[in-house]
Image (cartoon, helix red, strand yellow):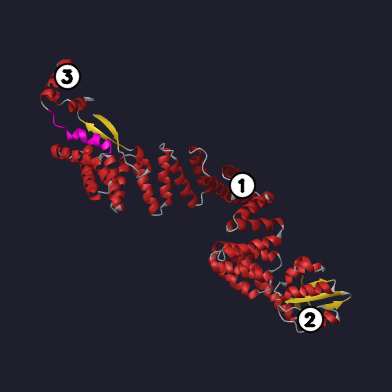
């Protein structure tokens, strides 16, 4: 059986359609169909005649009378030239003359899909599939017509039937993959798109789709490899591609590669975005000094971009520049007040500065914004434990046990420790002991400065770290449980009646000034 193929001219539908083809089949031996179409007189001439005589007689006949146009020949030609209106008329004429034929029906289906003549496309498609149920191309385009008509279940049925006949039809694979994506069946979509790639379709758009699906499933390395493949086929990728590849590299644990991608991005388009990306990559790769250089540049060039400022604050925190980090954390939260990660990180920062109560408040805001943020709940319990707020810590631990059943054993051990600590605390109280923070100052000038900052709301622990000369300063002044009756008389007097979280007046003893805070 002879056949010839012609382009569908399927413009702008799916990427894989750009190379789609249909076959026109004929029962005549190879080549005969074309000679008969071009020279109708040959139909009545014996093939045993010399070719020259045949051609001469045809020429004479053509000169004597005009041969009517053959719609079965003209229709495909007009279709290939994208003259759809004329092609449709000719192909319909061919149907009227010769009856239904798959090779004539299929171009009518394709044109119906392209021009949104969906009822017509569905009708012709159904006839084509009925006539040739083993024709995969017919099932494919009938499925396309059904899908465009909002009949996805029927479209899927046609495509699965086509796939059972052949597993290498790119259009059917793509159609089923896109339906799987629409139905959130990402694993199936990934498998079908990957099959298209295994069949040799190594187009950038396909690699990008696979990269997007992989990233959505947390498959960072696979996503990076797919994106890198697309970039390589396109000559290196755009700035946005390079920055995305850097983020995927960080997620995949390949920090040096992230730095390399961002360096290329800076060369391609130096500016706030690429500086910020390179700073983030350096920070992830633990090159903090280099990270600070580029993150400062990013913030200078784009001060209203919260991400750059947040990353700079974290880099400053790690490098020990806590005062500047504090400024950038606060500025970030002014820009994005409802960011739970920002609140959480600022809470950690405050706790490191000895401002545990303020840090606790920020962590609690993070939990309010994102109740599923388990790390924030863990830190809240730790802060409550450090403040001796046993009951509150136990309540939060119960909440965490409900949310994090995978770590039930470890959380159970933590609960037992909290209960023991609470019991021990109560025993100390019963023994007349109190828990104190202690600040030791050498001059009245420092005393006045500390009192002034306390009056503005500065936290006692932070001031201890900054100003105290006592040995407990490294622990925020925590001297644990003490019995006031064992202290010198002037200190006993200053501590008398001191309530939880109250701060004593300055107490002078042996040339030094002592300030205490009672803590739970």
- N-terminal of the pair, mark 1 or mark 2, is 1
- N-terminal of the pair, mark 3 or mark 2, is 3
> Is residue 232 depicted above or below 28 in this figure?
below
Identify the image quadrant of the C terminus: bottom right
Distance between the alpha carbons at the discs numbered 3 and 2: 125 Å
Please give the label number shown on residue 495: 2
- Quadrant location of residue 84? top left
Labels 3, 2: front one:
3
Give the magenta-colored segment's residue range: 66-82
Give the camera-side residue of 98 and 329: 329
Labels 1, 3: front one:
3
- Which residue is located at x 64 percent, y 49 percent? 282
Report crowding for label 1: few under 14, some 14 to 19, many 20 or more residues within 10 A (C-alpha): many
Name the side, left or right, on which 195 lies relative to 383.
left
Q: Which residue is mark 3?
A: 55
Q: Is residue 437 visible?
A: no
- Quadrant location of residue 434? bottom right
Magenta stretch: includes residue 428: no
Magenta stretch: includes residue 68: yes
Distance between the alpha carbons at the discs numbered 1 and 2: 54 Å
Give the camera-side residue of 190 and 287: 287
Q: How many marks?
A: 3
Provide residue 51's location: percent of width, then percent of height: 18, 17
Please give the label number shown on residue 255: 1
- N-terminal of the pair, mark 1 or mark 3, is 3
Labelled pair 3, 2 in contact (Cβ < 8 Å): no
Labelled pair 1, 3 in contact (Cβ < 8 Å): no
Q: Is residue 346 visible?
A: yes
């Amino acid at each position: 059986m002879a056949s010839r193929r012609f382009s569908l001219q399927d413009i702008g539908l799916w990427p894989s359609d750009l190379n789609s083809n249909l076959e026109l089949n004929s029962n005549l031996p190879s080549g005969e169909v074309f000679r008969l179409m071009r020279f109708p007189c040959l139909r009545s001439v014996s093939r045993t005649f010399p070719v020259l005589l045949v051609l001469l007689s045809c020429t004479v006949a053509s000169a004597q009378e005009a041969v009517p146009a053959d719609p079965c020949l003209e229709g495909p030609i007009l279709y290939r030239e994208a003259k759809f209106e004329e092609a449709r008329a000719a192909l319909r004429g061919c149907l009227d003359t010769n009856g239904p034929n798959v090779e004539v029906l299929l171009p009518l289906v394709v044109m119906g899909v392209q021009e949104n003549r969906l009822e017509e496309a569905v009708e012709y498609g159904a006839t084509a599939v009925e006539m040739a149920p083993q024709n995969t191309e017919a099932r494919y385009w009938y499925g396309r017509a059904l899908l465009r008509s909002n009949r996805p279940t029927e479209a899927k049925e046609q495509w699965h039937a086509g796939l059972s006949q052949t597993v290498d039809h790119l259009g059917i694979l793509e159609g089923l993959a896109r339906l799987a994506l629409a139905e959130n069946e990402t694993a199936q979509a990934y498998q079908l798109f990957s099959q298209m790639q295994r069949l040799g379709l190594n187009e950038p758009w396909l690699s990008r789709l696979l990269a997007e699906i992989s990233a959505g499933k947390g498959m960072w390395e696979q996503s990076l490899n797919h994106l890198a493949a697309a970039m390589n086929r396109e000559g290196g990728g755009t700035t946005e591609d390079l920055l995305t590849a850097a983020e995927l590299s960080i997620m995949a644990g390949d920090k040096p590669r992230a730095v390399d991608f961002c360096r290329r991005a800076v060369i391609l388009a130096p500016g706030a975005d690429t500086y910020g990306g390179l700073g983030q990559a350096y920070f992830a790769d633990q090159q903090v000094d280099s990270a600070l250089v580029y993150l400062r540049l990013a913030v200078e060039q784009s001060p209203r971009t919260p991400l750059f400022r947040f990353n700079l604050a974290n880099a400053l925190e790690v490098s020990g520049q806590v005062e500047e980090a504090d400024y950038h954390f606060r500025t970030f939260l002014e820009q994005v007040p409802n960011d739970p990660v920002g609140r959480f990180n600022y809470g950690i920062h405050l706790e490191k500065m000895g401002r545990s109560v303020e840090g606790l408040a920020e962590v609690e805001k993070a939990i309010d914004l994102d109740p599923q943020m388990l790390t924030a709940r863990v830190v809240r319990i730790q802060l409550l434990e450090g403040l001796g707020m046993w009951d509150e810590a136990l309540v939060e631990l119960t909440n965490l046990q409900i949310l994090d059943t995978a770590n039930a054993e470890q959380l159970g051990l933590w609960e037992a420790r909290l209960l023991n600590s609470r019991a021990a605390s109560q025993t100390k109280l019963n023994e007349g002991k109190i828990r104190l923070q202690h600040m030791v100052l050498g001059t009245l000038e420092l005393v006045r400065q500390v009192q002034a900052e306390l009056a503005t709301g500065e936290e006692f622990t932070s001031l201890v770290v900054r100003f105290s000369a006592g040995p407990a300063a490294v622990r925020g002044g925590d001297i644990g449980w003490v019995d006031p009756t064992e202290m010198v008389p002037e200190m006993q007097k200053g501590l008398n009646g001191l309530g939880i979280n109250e701060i004593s007046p300055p107490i002078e003893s042996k040339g030094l000034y002592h300030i205490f805070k009672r803590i739970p």
